[in-house]
Image (cartoon, rainbow, N blue to C red):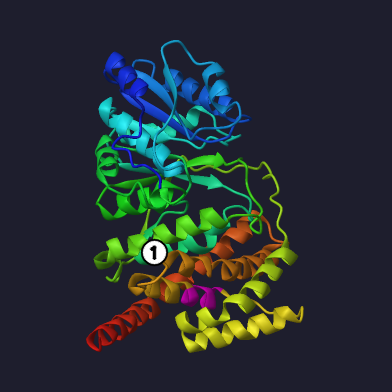
Amino acid sequence: MIKKYPSAPRQNVHMWVNQIHNVDILVAVPCFNNEDTIGFVVEQSAKGLAQYFPDMKTAVFVSDGGSLDDTRENAYRAPAPEKVLKRVTIYRGLPGKGTSFRAVFEVATLLKAKAVAVVDSDLRSITPEWIRLLIEPILNRSAGFVVPYYRRHKFDGTITNHIVYPMTRALYGVDVRQPIGGDFGFSPELAAFYMGEDVWDTDMAKFGIDIWMTTCAINEGHSVVQTYLGTKVHDAKDPAADLGPMFQQVISTLFYLMGKYRSNWRQNNSLRVIPVSNKHEQDSELAPVAVGLKKLQAEFVDGFNHFRPMYEQVLDPENLDRLVHIHERWKANREMEFDPDLWSRILYDFACVYQLWQRNRRRLVDIITPLYFGRTRSYCEQVMNMNDQDAEAVVQAQATIFEENKTYLLERFAHWEKESAAALGGT
């Protein structure tokens, strides 16, 4: 059993807080085994603080998950202007990005920071200007939460493109393109709210933290803005690679939050477009992201064979029939699109069942994975010869389909509620 801690920062961090008392701006870098990139991220963050906020008291806080490489050493060695404070520490608690953020929320609150930013530790494209763009809207009180907007390769961010973005947009009526972008700015009020939530032994303590932060900011009434950060270059992964834990944690959190904010998404939310500040065109080509179409297809076919009895329990019969047809075609290596209409209905089926499922919810989310591989494979095949702009139009069209099918979600949820009530009445 993992021990629960009432505080994520260690005692030496509390001593550091007592020494410096307060800061105006805190930039935090959650990290784990990022020795190749952490120094650059810390250096650029510190430069941004010194360059754009020279008259303010600022600090860079590196929250490490117990890296086994030279991450902490490289963070310590990273050059920083003398006036920018720096602290590198190992947090306490359940290992994961979310627990790292918990330490950030606590330190920001203890230091009475007026604005906070967090940036990913594997970034290769961060510039000092990123810090200004994430912090300024918080300082001038034009926003409580700043979400990044990037240029990304058409094969990068598949969990975002095919699940998190279209569902967040359809559920809550807010067009936030990168809800799990990883690089955020937020107000002290939000930091205090996040710190006060008791979620640190759940999936939010791991990779679920990004969607949790964004969804809470939207639903708790904080003003949200998007800021254009240009091209995001980081350690991108092949969609067919081992994304298991991340997929499980992100989707579990997304579904969990549907329960928390049920009264919000059950309304007919008209789409609220969030303007993107600092948007400008870039002509530079994006670094390619590898994708294994054959592996994606094999994962779908094998996974469907294995989990079919459970799909029969969860999916609407018409959706299951359509899925069976795709499986038969792909098993015979014949082409057929796994289209976004079917995909949206399948995700809505799972989302409804998750809310009322009394058994192992993790297992329920796990069996979505082969279907996600199937939809990703179909999308990658469709956009293979498109440029990134045209591929983005495909993602946007899919998000519109999710919105149009929200009626289906509401009907299915009402159906499952009746089924659940009837089952309880018969016990």
Q: For the stretch drawn in magenta, what is the main secondary structure?
A: helix
Residue closest to the far top: 82
Report how many numbered discs are placed on residues in the image: 1
Range of magenta residues: 340-346
Read off the residue under disc 1: 255
- How far from the left and from the top, in percent, is residue 389? 61, 56
Residue 23 covered by magenta stretch = no
Q: In percent of the image, x 38 and y 74: which residue is there?
A: 352
Tell me if residue 247 comes above or below residue 421 in the rendering. above
Q: Nearer the viewer, residue 156 or 366?
A: 366
- How far from the left and from the top, in percent, is residue 121? 53, 35
**Amino acid type of the residue that numbered disc 1 sits on in the rendered structure:** Phe
- How far from the left and from the top, in percent, is residue 394? 58, 65
The quadrant of the picture occupied by the C terminus is bottom left
Residue 345 covered by magenta stretch = yes
Residue 335 visible in the displayed image: no
Q: In percent of the image, x 75 and y 80: which residue is there?
A: 334
Tell me if residue 136 comes above or below residue 374 in the rendering. above
Q: In percent of the image, x 49 and y 20: which residue is there?
A: 47
